[in-house]
Each structure stands twice: as structure tokens, then as C-alpha cells.
Image: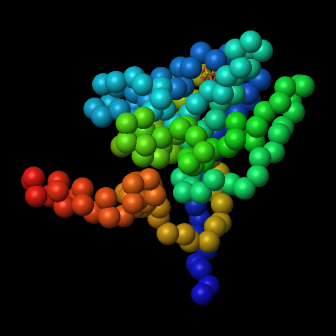
């Protein structure tokens, strides 16, 4: 089946990691913005940007939450940058079973950077706005892409709960909740 081409706005945040001083303002504003109600709680564990940290070497590296994936990948590469070794997972943006990163701490639901969707829209993503060291730079461009299905976030969340607890447990829980009203 031939898919239609559409013009799409591509949003990118460019990261200059060597400028990051680990202040974590980006984690704070992201977790506060996504709290319910907004800014009610500041919990960096819920942030969609996480700062990979090696305190003894003064290394701080921002990583953004990407796609949910139900399976672990098969291999592990080691990267050496300035004579320091990093596992491939260190730079990976996926929410996967290998680690707790980019998951809601209580429910384990996957977190994903939404570039700060808001109404009215943000001028720039909030983490970019609060970063005083020019580590994060926001860019927009138009690109012609094949039309894709909208990602259904409810479906992604349910899929992750089914992967974790099983389909039957999820259905039993929903039935029980419905009965309680
Ligand atoms: S706000 Fe900027 S300097 Fe501070 S931790 Fe985040 S990316 Fe690094
Ligand atoms: S762009 Fe917005 S949602 Fe994404 S990490 Fe930054 S503050 Fe969080």
C-alpha cells in the first residue's frame, strides 16, 4: 500500500554535553511541568530528561526519554570518550525492561519527552528555557515524511502494563475498578 507524503514539523533539541554543569534545572522544571496539577510536586525521577552523572570526573550528560520498547536489545557496545568508558545503555533513550530509567516510579508507566506539549504552545521546550549554560538548543524544520499513525499514548501505557503484569491481571483489575465505580 502506498502511503501519502505529508509535510511535518520536526522538533529537535541539540545537546552540547561538554557544557553541562549538572545543575539539574532541566530535570526539575520537566518533572514539575508534568506533575498533576502542574508544579504541585517536583520529583526529578519523573523527569523526561535525565542527567547521566559521573561525579568524580565532573561528567554530566543529558539524555531525553524516547520510545517505549517491551524487549531488551541483544548486544551491549562500550563507548570510550576522553578515555572514559560508557555502556551503550548510558546514551540510550528507550524505556525498556533493562533499567528503571524513564518510568513513573510508582506505576512503572513509560515516560516520553513530548517537547512540552501545552495549550497555548510553549515558545521553546521548558528544559531549553531554564538551561543557563546553552547546553540545549531547540530547532524546528519542515520535512516531507510518509504519513504515519498517531501514537496512542493510552495504548502505549496499557501495553507496558500488560507486558509487566499480564493481560488477565489487567482485565481483572479494570473489572474490579469498574464495579467499585
Ligand atoms: S539545565 Fe543545562 S546545565 Fe543544568 S543539568 Fe540541565 S542541561 Fe545541564
Ligand atoms: S522538552 Fe519538555 S518534556 Fe522534553 S525533557 Fe525537556 S522539559 Fe521535559
Q: Is residue 56 above or below residue 176?
A: above
Q: How many marks?
A: 0
Residue drawn at point x = 44 percent, y = 29 percent: 31
The quadrant in which residue 128 appears is top right
6 on left or right of 84: left
Q: Is residue 42 above or below residue 143?
A: above
Q: Position of residue 84 (x, y in %)?
A: 84, 26
Display colour scheme: rainbow
Q: Is residue 111 above or below residue 54?
A: below
The residue closer to the viewer here, 120 or 133, is 133
Q: Position of residue 14 (x, y in %)?
A: 69, 37
The residue closer to the viewer here, 121 or 89, is 89
Residue drawn at point x = 59 percent, y = 65 percent: 7
Q: Position of residue 33 (x, y in %)?
A: 40, 31
Q: Is residue 63 visible?
A: yes
The residue closer to the viewer here, 60 or 150, is 60
Q: Is residue 115 visible?
A: no
Q: From the image, which quarter does the N terminus lie in?
A: bottom right
Residue drawn at point x = 65 percent, y = 66 percent: 144
Q: Quadrant of ligand 1?
A: top right
The residue closer to the viewer here, 32 or 124, is 32
Q: Pick out the residue farthest to the bottom.
A: 1
Amino acid at each position: 500500500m502506498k502511503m501519502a507524503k505529508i509535510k511535518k514539523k520536526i522538533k529537535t533539541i541539540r545537546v552540547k554535553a561538554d557544557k553541562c554543569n549538572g545543575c539539574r534545572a532541566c530535570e526539575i522544571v520537566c518533572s514539575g511541568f508534568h506533575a498533576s496539577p502542574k508544579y504541585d510536586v517536583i520529583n526529578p525521577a519523573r523527569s523526561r530528561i535525565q542527567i547521566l552523572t559521573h561525579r568524580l570526573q565532573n561528567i554530566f550528560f543529558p539524555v531525553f526519554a524516547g520510545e517505549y520498547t517491551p524487549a531488551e536489545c541483544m548486544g551491549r557496545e562500550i563507548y570510550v570518550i576522553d578515555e572514559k568508558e560508557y555502556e551503550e545503555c548510558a546514551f540510550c533513550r528507550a524505556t525498556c525492561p533493562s533499567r528503571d530509567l524513564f518510568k513513573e516510579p510508582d506505576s512503572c508507566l513509560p515516560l516520553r519527552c513530548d517537547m512540552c506539549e501545552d495549550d497555548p504552545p510553549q515558545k521553546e521546550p521548558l528544559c531549553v528555557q531554564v538551561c543557563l549554560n546553552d547546553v540545549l538548543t531547540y530547532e524546528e524544520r519542515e520535512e516531507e515524511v510518509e504519513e504515519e499513525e498517531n501514537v496512542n499514548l493510552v495504548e502505549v501505557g496499557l501495553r507496558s502494563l500488560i507486558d509487566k503484569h499480564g493481560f488477565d491481571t489487567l482485565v481483572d483489575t479494570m473489572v474490579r475498578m469498574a464495579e467499585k465505580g
